[in-house]
Amino acid sequence: MNFPQQMTALKTIATKEYLRFIRIWVQTILPPAITIALYFIIFGEIIGKQIGDIDGYKYMDYIVPGLILMAVITNAYANVVSSFFSSKFHHSIEEMLVSPLPNYIILLGFVSGGVARGIIVGTIATVVSMFFSEIQIHSYSVTLAVFILTSILFALAGFINAAYARSFDDITIIPTFVLTPLIYLGGVFYSIKMLPEFWQNVSLVNPILYMVNAFHYGILGVSDIDVTTAFVIIIGFIVVLYYFALRLLRIGVGLKP
């Protein structure tokens, strides 16, 4: 299969993945917008007034980047984990595997769907946040880069989860017991400077902390973590997860009886 044919195949898979979640937008796009609005009302309006300023920003303004990125993370992950596992469950993935398609085209096709959903939901979350906070973006380039890289990273993570999953219950274990705790402990609702030194050091092990803080810098211009270090870690995770996912696809983990 030559390069133009590969690109046509990639476009076809990506379009399928996009249409898959956009057709049921009431289930995939609308709920995150409502959830984000509730977070702003409960944490920003009610609890935020009791907390005061953080790094010179009102609490409502401070949590905007974290809440937007949380929407990106959960939706990029959820789209790929559900889509790829459904393809396994219905055996449609087998048709792709026996075709001349390179494995990386299949992987990128599924990941592109997760990235698209993450970006769309993240954009909607940004629009919703404008009703609660006056956003003044500090660096458009950093904000956009973190936006896209985070979507890619968690789309890949969702693919890996789906590859190992043996049942629909398995695709909820990682989001419930791993992803959600990491998000809530990743500086979405607080600065790690507010923690005792021991817990600050523990927080540095959490990769989501680096994404959230890089996004904080992009929007607010403040960060608890060096932004360059954050980008190195994000890109490093993407590279590792990409080659790991590609290997799983090549050796057929979760695809063979």
Image (cartoon, helix red, strand yellow):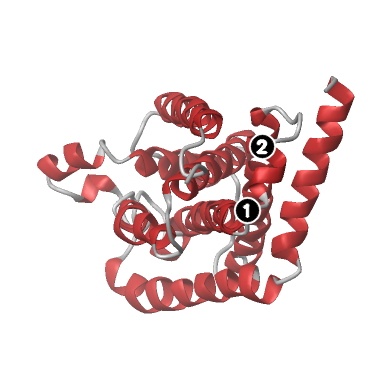
Residue 5, position in %: x, y? Answer: 87, 28
Q: Which mark is residue 156?
A: none
Residue 82, position in %: x, y? Answer: 55, 58
Q: In the figure, is residue 35 to the left or right of 186?
A: right
Distance between mark 1 and mark 2 Cα atoms = 10 Å
Residue 6, position in %: x, y? Answer: 81, 29
Q: Residue at x 26, y 36 (%)?
A: 204
Q: Is residue 250 above or below residue 152?
A: above
Q: Closer to the camera, 38 or 245?
A: 245
Residue 247, position in %: x, y? Answer: 50, 27
Q: Residue at x 41, y 42 (%)?
A: 213
Number of marks drawn: 2
Image quadrant occupied by the N terminus:
top right
Q: Is residue 245 above or below residue 41?
A: above
Q: Amino acid at mark 2?
A: Leu
Which residue bears the numbered disc 2?
97
Which residue bears the numbered disc 1?
91
Q: Amino acid at mark 1?
A: His
- Kindly state the secondary structure of the residue where label 1 is placed: loop
Q: Residue at x 47, y 28 (%)?
A: 231
Q: Residue at x 65, y 29 (%)?
A: 104
Q: Is residue 220 above or below residue 97?
A: below
- Kindly state the secondary structure of the residue where label 2 is placed: helix
Q: Closer to the camera, 189 or 62?
A: 189
**Residue 46, picture quadrant:** bottom left
